[in-house]
Amino acid sequence: MHDNNMQEKPLDFSKLCTFGNYKEVWKKYGYIRNLSDVLQQDFRRIKEITYLDHAAATLYPESLVRNFCQDISTNVYGNPHSQNPSSRLTYDTVERVRDRVLQHFNTTSEEYSVIFTSGCTAALKLVAESFPWRSPTATEAGGRSQFCYLTDNHTSVVGIRAVTSALGVVTLPVSPQEVETRAKDGPQNKGNGCQTPHLFCYPAQSNFSGRKYPLSYLKGIKARELYPASDYQGLWFVLLDAASYVSCSHLDLQEHSADFIPISFYKMFGFPTGLGALLVRNDSAAFLRKGYFGGGTAAAYLAGDDYYVQTTNISDRFEDGTLSFLDIISLNHGFDALQTITGDMDKIQMHTFGLARYTYMLLSCLHHNNGKPVAQIYTASEFESPSTQGPILNFNLIDCHGHTIGYSQVEKLASLFNIHVRTGCFCNIGACQLFLGTSDQEVKKNLQVGHVCGDNIDLVDGRPTGSVRISFGYMSTFQDCKTFLKFVVDCFVEKPVKVDQKRWKRLKSATSLEDSSPDLISRTTEEKAGHFHRGAIHVTTEPSVNTFEDNATTKDTSTHGKGHTLVTIYIYPIKSCAAFQVCDWPMGPQGLLYDRGWMVVNGNGVCLSQKREARLCLIHPQVHLPSNTLHLHASGMDSISVPLNIPNETLQRNKVCQSKVCGDRVKTVDCGEEAASWLSEFLGQPCRLIRQSSDVIRDMKNGLEQGMPSALSLVNEAQYLLINRASVELLLKHITSRQEGSEDHPSFNIQQLIGRFRANLVIDGIEPFEEDDWSHLIIGNTNFQVAGQCGRCQMIGVNQDTGAKTKEPLLSLSAYHKGKVTFGVYLNHQLQENPTEAYTLTIGSSVMPEMLK
């Protein structure tokens, strides 16, 4: 009943996903130089990478860095606040870059000034702190200022209200629909002498959906024809957030003159990353009020009296202290590279839009074998024109039952294929709420259950907390589209894949502007009414079922009170190194004694895991309790030992430092030069061994019941990780089945597969995946609380015997769980504060689970 749009002869996805079909959809591809030559000469480092996160940061061409290094290697650039030759060279070069920036946006220093900042956010903060806000206590007639912003704005724009609220300025969020629907006919300025300053902020391009808002809003707001300016008298200024827009589109400030335009250069060139600018209309800059003054901003001042005269030059007035002049000089080479490689921004716009349009068309037409859509795409258009849509595609994937697949699961599998995407809400909660249909109360509820921006909690009560975003840059290729679409089909589509032929033909035949002139492309067009492509979300009340090929294993929920067995105990003394198997082991306040008590860091003090350095699994640490030592073994290396307990005199001598583990800052102690040299030699890079300091307690992320102790070693989430041997056996069958008929695939046995999951405790005697429904359990004489399921990452693709990487078993786990990649459960123990006997875990101990209520 879902196949109404499917023709008798369905379209073949693999045939659609060809460059010939792409050219039928969009003819503008590439630049003056052959794109493959560009990649070979300037982007060799991404040969095996599908990079689809250009909206966050585009990639720099190698020629930019080479030419910049040659520049600063042959010239002497001094501090520009002087008159000596090196200072003058810097000053003149920086001024040349200012002119080049203005030239790029088709304006001059007579109209605009370039104020360099540390980034786009710093530029916005500068406007917030310098705008002439009028508070309620102002004596001038006309009332207080309005700070208005489109709800589809970046956090850094919305954050201006922290400044305005403190001043009593009115904050007015405006939905995208209100700007035009609440507009008034004709200008509202006639006969109006009110001079109260107001600020309206909107993005030229949404960083969430890629929607391009009409640049005609600039004139409409200033003329008080559009809402909210139409309802409030006074002087209206417009801040146009162009950071996302200018990465792939041309902004003509002669035609579209905003008062304030913040930008980030790394979104344009990829380098440098710590530099942005605020472009300010010179007429509007006269209204700004400078507070703090620093070096270079003063024409004159007195140290002993409150006397200060600001410089007349607008840029100098707002650039406190010494500029990051070498970064600014590098922009010369950024503009050179952009021009040499692409020709101009119009070509970039056409190329990147074509890639996004093609990907959107095919993704929106993909269906599971039962006819249900594969993706829920968040867009206000159907990618008809580059004047209304940028090269950004935002979506969530949907399984064949209509359930959202969490964005974290998609990102993990994408990383396995070296596909770089971005997930979450992208610092744009307004757009996220709008497209996902999330209410304010739901956002607050999600926070209460532990979800914060940037974490991996992608679903709460089955509803998504964010989405997946892919975005294209000028060096993106058709192969990037193909790789991504094939990844979606291979990992998330219930076969055989179906294509909505009726929709494909309609989108393909839609009128486009691809053969129009650049002037027509850049001209703002009338937008169609916004719409969302939303797949229906169905909630099932059927029993939980794990599907394995044609068989189904329904979880048996009648095992309450059954006795099972602990069959294996592993500890991992050094985080990410090999396991140490034991028959019985003491338990301490942080879990198994000495489990994850040490970790390896690189030369910059960053924690190394098998994700970054797979050879860590070839280091075999062993704890020898009688001698109070930790022994390190590795093939081809002499063994060394490290004391388990560091004496006080050694603690005073060795370096104490702050490190980060899974986002938590922990206090650690360096274990000395011998261990550092041993690790550095084996891993082939500067490394050090550090251990957790006993001075600071690291709290659990998943806390125990009230009144219970909470302490973690250097583990990820909880004190213990438990897996079920029966679950591993079922997964092994699935892997074997997937690999049937394949000539080149890794072989697995049950013990090797168990090793991939790096559990502390392995149990036997229960049904597969029964452990997912436990809330508590008793092992021996110790109570444990289940803290949640373990979300697996690509680290389980590392062969723990050889260090080789494979895509199994993560792919099989995802296919088995329909996109969900959890395996094993986290446990926290519940020890008595004053036990009458020491706690010990022993192989053969009985396991008594309690089911979730």
Image: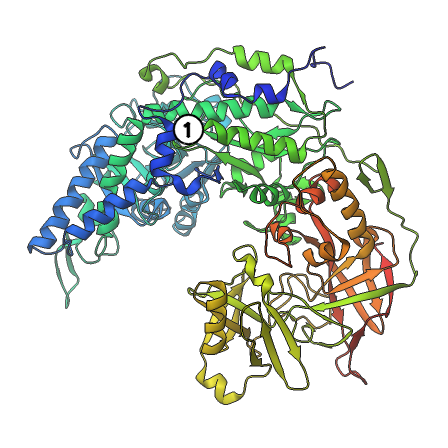
Q: Residue furthest bottom?
A: 649
Quarter of the view holding residue 284: top left
Question: As shown in the figure, which amino acid type bears the numbered disc 1?
Answer: Asp
Disc 1 designates what residue?
Answer: 231
**Picture layout, residue 773 above or below residue 522:** below
Which residue is more in the foreground, 512 or 464?
512
Q: Quadrant of the N terminus?
A: top right
Horizontal arrangement in the rendering, residue 742 relative to residue 411 (left or right)? right
Q: How far across and down, in percent of the image, does residue 842 sit?
A: 81, 73
Specify whether residue 651 is in view: yes
Which residue is more in the foreground, 141 or 58?
58
Q: How far across and down, in percent of the image, does residue 308 sit?
A: 15, 57
Quarter of the view holding residue 257: top left
Q: Residue furthest left?
A: 84
Q: How far across and down, in percent of the image, does residue 334 sit?
A: 27, 39
Which residue does the image show at 21% across and 48% down from the upper left?
A: 70
**Picture layout, residue 182 above or below residue 39:** above
Which residue is more in the foreground, 450 or 53?
53
Q: Determine whether the residue tagged by mark 1 lies in a helix, strand or loop.
A: helix
